[in-house]
Image: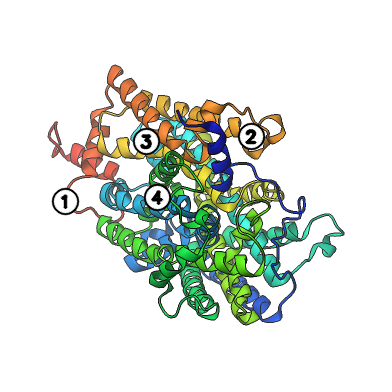
Amino acid sequence: MIDAAPLVADLAIGAAELMPLQSGSKLLPESLNVSFKLLPAIIVIGMMLLFIVAGFMFQVADTDDMWVAGRSIGNIENGMAIGANWMSAATYLGVAATVATAGVYGLAYVIGWTTGYFILLIFMAAQMRRFGKYTAPDFVGDRFNSDTARALAALTTFLIGFVYALGQARGMGLVGLYILGDWSALTGGLLTAYQTMMVVFMVITVAYLSLSGMLGATKNMVLQYVILIVAFLLGLVATGWAGGFTTVLPQLQYGMMIDSLASEFSAPFAGGSYYLWVATCFSLVFGTCGLPHVLVRFYTVKNERVARWSCTWGLFFISLLYLSAPAFAAVGTALYGDQIGAVYGDPGMTSAAGDVLVVLAAQLAGLPEWFVGFVAAGGIAAAVATTAGLFIAASSAISHDIYANIINEDATQRQQVLVGRLSIILIGLLTIIFALNPQQPIAALVGFAFSLAAIVLFPMFFLGLWWENTNRQGALSGMVTGIVVWFIPMINEGNFGLVNGGAGLGIEAISTWMPAIGSALIGTPIVFAVTIAVSLVTTEPPLETKQMVRQCHSPDPMPSDKTAADIVAEKNRDGNAPADD
């Protein structure tokens, strides 16, 4: 049995426990230069205006462009969009923060998120494209012949988007403090400095998304990827050089710094137990394969070949940053320890400072103000890009899967687009309200969303694509079980103030073996077992459903405007489909 007391402490260090905010609700990172800076402000304002212009230029009028960008995106372009869509504030800011504060434990994020793309590439990308729907809930509803399953998947998609977006909103607010300073006076003291910045950037993001849909969001994601990767890599090289730690290849050279850093950074699992590392990594790997805003990227391309290549390019573009984040963490930790105070211990580096460590390190290295502003702009671009993907996925779940497929089956394209835009505004408002006082670091907030995706949606996608006998009853049983299992550790830890004003239930056994951030290690096998068991003891799915699954694995090419269901229907109508086809 693992000793629960040190594990709970490890969870706090590993960004999974409820954390008190510095200075009450103000959330001001220590030593961050919070003031208006003209050149950085010009950079960020220009960047946000560019996003709005792109959204206006590619504004949508039909559902194809709204949800899947007309299935017109090429492999490199989609790979860059995958990179931007994926590399959120949790990646740009949160990975360096978690590695800095939790050392080797933080590498679970790098390894988990990267490994997930190999599973996507091998087992899911091409098959999802051949199935050929608009959204992730669309797949669940059609594959399991159930509007109830569709609604559960849509609800889960909305919840994932909401939880995930909280981390992005927190990142925008914290980084915005460095660039634009304290604007809280404009609210008459109603909002704090952090809250004001968060609201400003979230409103701009919602505005451009309401115009653009998936087509405009994809074009913007390409721009956002270029901005964020250039800002991060140049920022790393310049910070390492100015601080005297590295020269031209900090990704390789930072290893020489390890011995001079505290043991909490370099000692294996000093910042989190081995079990917690495995659980976190597992949740991140399989959560990657269940995220609706990632899977929908494979619906935006012409065919399964482009889907595979775009996944490969996406992995390459993502690796450029993931190979660099630990180096930024090492350099930032060293600069913080030299100029501010002890990184670990009491009080140590706060979660707010950790979440802006990339920007703070560039500032502490003495780089020009405009350059630090450019690095900060990359963080905002990362947060905006991921928020775009999340909100499109969540709004499509409401508009396409619930409204058009369940509530009003005769809805026109104009009505669906309108409901989609209103849904974006709704989730934006909810995110703003709950992000006013975020009680967890960015990486923890995102980790909760990954656990939910791994427990509820990944088993449905994997079994739906690879086991033709998975049926409606099995899917419904598995999804309901998964939602209940995910909420257990969330309630136990009091996340989002669900129980006892945020204190939670505090049951040691659950905290030890099923931490919220790594709950998929227990939850995902349970959902697989329930889904398979119920499917085995109930009626097999219809032959047409089995034929759709087989079509997802057929070596024959498919037209870009056809789905697996279309091909099966044509074969059956023409009498060309044998019973075992």
Residue appearing at x 50%, y 42% in the figure: 157
Q: How far apart are labels 4 and 1 at the CA level? A: 33 Å
Q: Are marks 2 and 1 in contact (CB under 8 Å)?
A: no
Q: Which residue is mark 4?
A: 112
Estimate the spatial distance between the alpha carbons at disc 3 and disc 2, rounded to whole Å: 28 Å
Mark 3 lies on a secondary structure that is: helix
Residue 494 numbered tag? 2
Q: Nearer the viewer, residue 18 or 523?
A: 18
Total marks placed: 4
The answer to whether the residues at label 4 and label 1 have Cβ atoms under 8 Å apart is no
Identify which residue is drawn at 65% across, 39% down: 496
Residue located beneath label 1 in the image = 556
Whether residue 362 is situated above or below residue 213 in the rendered picture: below
Amino acid type indicated by mark 3:
Met
Measured in 3D between alpha carbons, the distance from the residue under mark 4 to the one under mark 2, in whole angstroms, is: 25 Å
Q: Earlier in the sequence, mark 4 or mark 3?
A: 4
Would residue 412 be seen by someone viewing this image from the given angle? no
Q: Identify residue for label 3.
A: 460
Q: Report whether 175 appears left or right of 447.
A: right
* Coordinates of residue 40 in the picture (x, y in percent): 65, 77
Image quadrant assignment for residue 189: bottom right
> Which is closer to the viewer, label 3 or label 2?
2
